[in-house]
Amino acid sequence: MKLKSFAAVAALACSAFASHASPVVSVSNSASDLAAALAGSGISVSNASLTTASNTAAGTFTNGASTVGFDSGIVLTTGTVDCIAGPNTQTNCSGAGTTTSLAFDFISQTGKVFFQYVFGSEEYNEYVGSQYNDEFQLLLNGVNIALLPGNAGVVSINNVNCASNAAYYRNNSNGSCANQALNIQYDGLTTILTASADVMAGMVNRFEFLIFDRGDTAYDSGVFIKAGSFSGTNPVPLPGTLVLLGAGLLALGAVRRKLSN
């Protein structure tokens, strides 16, 4: 009995520790490796190029589930990946440079494209509403498709924060909304966002992930893109699918209750 109790306490302790884990980031300046890490089902990529704000501005990450929202992927920053690992102990973490871009050609076999991402920044919350309005863009053949749901605009400091489109914002510092105390250096992050578009199936298209400082070069921002989520199929179940799944689980529970009686 005592052994069982000890095991239960140990499991709870490990769970609590895991729930507060910080992302582990590795620098990478290989455009082809970063692009390959994103490619999922129904998508092939080629001709990747990377332009970075500094020699530590881009990389891959793991252990991001409890902070970013998904476990692994790539990260592009306006300065350095050194401004990512938590806890949030700095008020102004900055690296050299202003802009990082990852671009590549791709072919979708389904005629559709999706990917999931999270934007974060040190600009929150003190520079919301100012000219220091860092932004993330996803250019599909030159057109930005990194937009908030419901045509709510671009993904930037001034457009996603405690007061504007707050449903898509997670606060990690002092501000007008609750501090979620995430184990990451950035002062605020978006929720997981999904971008999607229609393209010609089997045709070559061009994608560019672009994150940039606006107003100055201080206070880093970064975008986390989920590994394998650059896909020809939707990574988020449709509402009807969720309803059917829920109905199935309810039916299964009813059968189990009936058998137990």
Image (cartoon, helix red, strand yellow):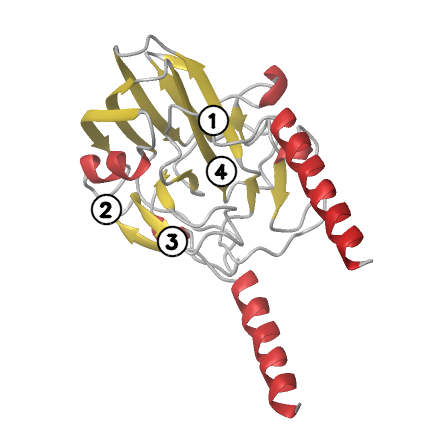
- Please give left or right for residue 171 compared with residue 258 in the image: left
Q: Mark 3 to mark 2: distance in Å?
A: 13 Å
Q: Mark 2 to mark 1: distance in Å?
A: 27 Å
* Image quadrant where residue 144 sits: top left
Q: Which residue is mark 2?
A: 28
Given residues 17 and 185, the one toward you in this image is 17
Label 1 sits on a secondary structure element that is loop
Q: Mark 1 to mark 3: distance in Å?
A: 22 Å
Q: Earlier in the sequence, mark 4 or mark 1?
A: 4
Q: Residue at x 56, y 61 (%)?
A: 19
Q: Amino acid at mark 1?
A: Asn
Q: Residue at x 33, y 33 (%)?
A: 40
Q: Amino acid at mark 4?
A: Val
- Dot 4: few (<14), some (14–19), or many (≥20) neighbours within 10 Å? many
Given residues 203 and 242, the one toward you in this image is 242
Q: Is residue 162 visible?
A: no
Q: Which residue is mark 3?
A: 62
Label 3 sits on a secondary structure element that is strand
Q: Which residue is mark 1?
A: 234
Q: Earlier in the sequence, mark 3 or mark 2?
A: 2
Q: Earlier in the sequence, mark 2 or mark 1?
A: 2
Q: Which residue is mark 4?
A: 118
Q: Quadrant of the C terminus?
A: bottom right
Q: Residue at x 53, y 31 (%)?
A: 236
Task: Evaluate if marks 3 and 2 touch, with contact meaning CB atoms under 8 Å apart.
Answer: no
**Residue 200's x, y, as percent?**
33, 8
Q: Mark 4 to mark 3: distance in Å?
A: 14 Å
Nearest-to-viewer mark from 4 and 1: 1
Task: Evaluate if marks 4 and 2 touch, with contact meaning CB atoms under 8 Å apart.
Answer: no
**Residue 260's x, y, as percent?**
78, 59
Q: Amino acid at mark 2?
A: Ser
**Residue 180's x, y, as percent?**
65, 52
